[in-house]
């Protein structure tokens, strides 16, 4: 490692869940750290996404840090599923409790980063026009942080208020007496819709794709509930680290097709009544791998929609078809379907009534003009890769990351991408990411990265890079795993289908959080097998683990 005082050990990009933990973990390991955050405050994804109704869809006991028992015990969650505002308060508490703001420069974007091969450092350029050198670059930019703008002509002509859920204004807009249109019915859209219904003069929902929405069953937490959770935190966290989704939920092996109709109905009704994000997927082991089993769940939920929505034509428009249940992230809401029984809520199905253009007065569809005072775009994100590809990153030989990923993102374990040494991605493409508990995945990644950096420092290694062959094999494995499921049958943001022109390749790893964690640990224990390690200001050595590199140098064991 360089002792040059002008070179920072690590630059962290972002100050959300991942960025904050990266700052703490690396600083505790004795590294100098500088973080940059584009916003003027803590929060990351939750800083930008605090639209009406925004809340996490995992229970607070799971979607929170596990690294500090004291933090777990002292923080008082108010609800089963915290709002964006409560999550912001939690992260601000974390930042203050562990003095993390000292390492963060706010209102500053990282615009570009170039790897200087002769020095094994990254030259980082920020939006304030300054540059700095860092040994390691750690983008903790989040998978859902770059909004995807709608592709609708005439948006710039609209004379009313217009907002994207992913860039909600700090000052909350007013809704009373306004005619509001919401475009999009994914998780953000569903939360906005059920929150604003009844709070404005009229709400018009422009639905591109009908989605599966299951009950949220959110509720305030009592002191007794918090105490029970604190008593079982250690067990809960330990179990979460070995399960498929990073939460303490066992997945069954039995088939829905082997159960009687009565048995299936009983399990589905229980999942509906005691709903959570994984509820239906926990009923049987083949819900996400067998088309017939999946359709049984899908039709059960469609029946619930028909029962809830009074107008048959509206109910028909809300029935999700064209993709298996669970292959797009299910949405949680207790009132979403019932809002369509209100006289002040209208549904426009864009498959039968497309938008022609936005005009100053509102939205013109093929059936006429809908006058609006406010437009809300819940049109999603350039997910998983967008935040990193919006930085002008140049690796070995000046190659652009955008050029390398032009036909689809490639990484080894979601941690590094070949040709871009000393750049670690947190929950990057090729890792479980959004298909597991993100807070648990973030801690696992940051811990691995910090341990790797400590190892490199202890062994005098200046450069680590992903081996290209290992990267290719890993991404092939990612695709092989998804091919055994129904996820490939959905045009989802998991594969970039929501962004025109983006290469469509399934990016999250579906092998399970526990299995993935074990793989990462095994790689580290084998001397970082599949990575290229090199000492000095030279080109990287052939793709071998540290054991081979040390043998060449005549070194035994782990000494230097």
Image (cartoon, rainbow, N blue to C red):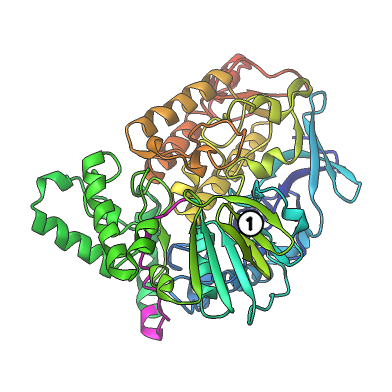
Helix, strand or loop at label 1? It is strand
Residue 269 can be seen, yes or no: yes
Dividing the picture into quadrants, the one containing residue 170 is bottom right
Q: Nearer the viewer, residue 321 or 546?
A: 321
Q: Residue at the spot x=9%, y=59% of the render? A: 262
Q: Is residue 211 magenta?
A: yes
**Image side of residue 351 versus residue 397, left or right:** left
**Residue at the outermost right position:** 129
**Residue at the outermost bottom position:** 223
Q: Residue at the spot x=52%, y=28% of the render? A: 527
Provide the residue designation for mark 1.
364
User: Which quadrant: the C terminus?
Assistant: top right
* Vertical arrangement, residue 87 with respect to residue 405, above or below: below
**Image side of residue 284 versus residue 10, left or right:** left
* Vertical arrangement, residue 386 with respect to residue 271, above or below: above
Q: Residues within 10 Å of mark 1 (few under 14, many from 20)?
A: some
Rendered location of residue 359, percent (x, y): 71, 57
Q: Which residues are magenta?
A: 209-225
User: Which quadrant: the N terminus?
Assistant: top right
Q: Residue at the spot x=52%, y=43% of the render? A: 493
Q: Nearer the viewer, residue 70 or 412?
A: 412
Dividing the picture into quadrants, the one containing residue 424 is top right
Rendered location of residue 355, percent (x, y): 59, 51
**Image side of residue 299 versus residue 545, left or right:** left
Q: Is residue 257 magenta?
A: no
Rendered location of residue 312, percent (x, y): 32, 64
Rendered location of residue 375, percent (x, y): 65, 64
Dividing the picture into quadrants, the one containing residue 448 is top right
């Amino acid at each position: 490692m360089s002792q040059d005082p002008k070179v920072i050990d690590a630059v962290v990009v972002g100050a959300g869940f991942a960025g904050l933990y990266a700052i703490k973990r690396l600083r505790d390991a004795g590294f100098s750290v500088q973080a940059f955050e584009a916003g003027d405050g803590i929060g990351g994804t939750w800083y930008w996404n605090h639209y009406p109704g925004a809340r996490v869809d995992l229970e607070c006991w799971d979607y929170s840090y596990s690294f500090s028992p004291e933090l777990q015990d002292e923080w008082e969650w108010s609800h089963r599923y915290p709002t964006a505002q409560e999550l912001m308060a939690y992260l601000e508490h974390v930042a203050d409790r562990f003095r993390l703001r000292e390492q963060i420069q706010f209102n500053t974007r990282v615009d570009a980063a170039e790897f200087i091969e002769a020095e094994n450092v990254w030259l980082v350029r920020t939006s304030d026009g300054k540059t700095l050198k860092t040994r390691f670059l750690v983008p903790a930019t989040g998978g859902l942080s770059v909004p995807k703008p709608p592709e609708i002509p005439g948006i710039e002509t609209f004379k009313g208020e217009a907002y994207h859920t992913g860039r909600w204004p700090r000052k909350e807009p007013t809704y009373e007496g306004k005619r509001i249109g919401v475009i999009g019915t994914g998780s953000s859209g569903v939360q906005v819709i059920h929150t604003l219904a009844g709070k404005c003069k009229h709400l018009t929902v422009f639905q591109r794709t009908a989605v599966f929405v299951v009950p949220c069953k959110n509720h305030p937490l009592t002191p007794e509930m918090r105490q029970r959770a604190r008593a079982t935190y250690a067990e809960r966290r330990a179990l979460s680290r070995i399960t498929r989704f990073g939460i303490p939920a066992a997945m069954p092996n039995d088939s829905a097709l082997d159960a009687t109709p009565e048995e299936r109905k009983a399990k589905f009704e229980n999942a509906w009544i005691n709903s959570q994000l994984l509820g239906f997927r926990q009923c049987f082991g083949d819900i996400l791998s067998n088309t017939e089993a999946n359709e049984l769940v899908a039709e059960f939920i469609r029946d619930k929609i028909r029962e809830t929505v009074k107008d048959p034509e509206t109910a028909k428009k809300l029935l999700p078809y064209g993709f298996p249940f669970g292959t797009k992230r299910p949405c949680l809401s207790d009132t979403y379907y019932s809002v369509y029984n209100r006289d002040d809520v209208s549904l426009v199905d864009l498959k039968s009534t497309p938008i022609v253009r936005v005009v100053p007065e509102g939205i013109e569809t093929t059936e006429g003009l809908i006058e609006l005072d406010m437009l809300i775009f819940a049109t999603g994100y350039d997910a998983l890769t967008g935040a990193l590809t919006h930085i002008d990153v140049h690796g070995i030989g000046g190659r652009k990351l955008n050029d390398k990923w032009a036909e689809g993102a490639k990484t080894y374990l979601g941690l590094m991408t070949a040709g871009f040494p000393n750049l670690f991605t947190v929950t990057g493409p090729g890792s479980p990411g959004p298909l597991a508990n993100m807070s648990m995945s973030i801690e696992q990644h940051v811990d691995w990265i910090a341990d790797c950096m400590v190892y490199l420092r202890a062994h005098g290694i200046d450069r680590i890079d992903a081996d290209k062959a290992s990267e290719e094999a890993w991404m092939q494995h990612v695709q092989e795993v998804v091919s055994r499921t129904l996820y490939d049958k959905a045009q989802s943001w998991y594969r970039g289908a929501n962004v025109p022109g983006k290469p469509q390749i399934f990016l999250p790893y579906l092998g399970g959080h526990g299995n993935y964690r074990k793989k990462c640990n095994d790689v580290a224990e084998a001397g970082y097998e599949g990575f290229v390690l090199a000492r000095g200001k030279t080109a990287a050595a052939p793709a071998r683990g540290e054991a081979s590199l040390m043998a060449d140098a005549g070194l035994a064991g782990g000494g230097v």
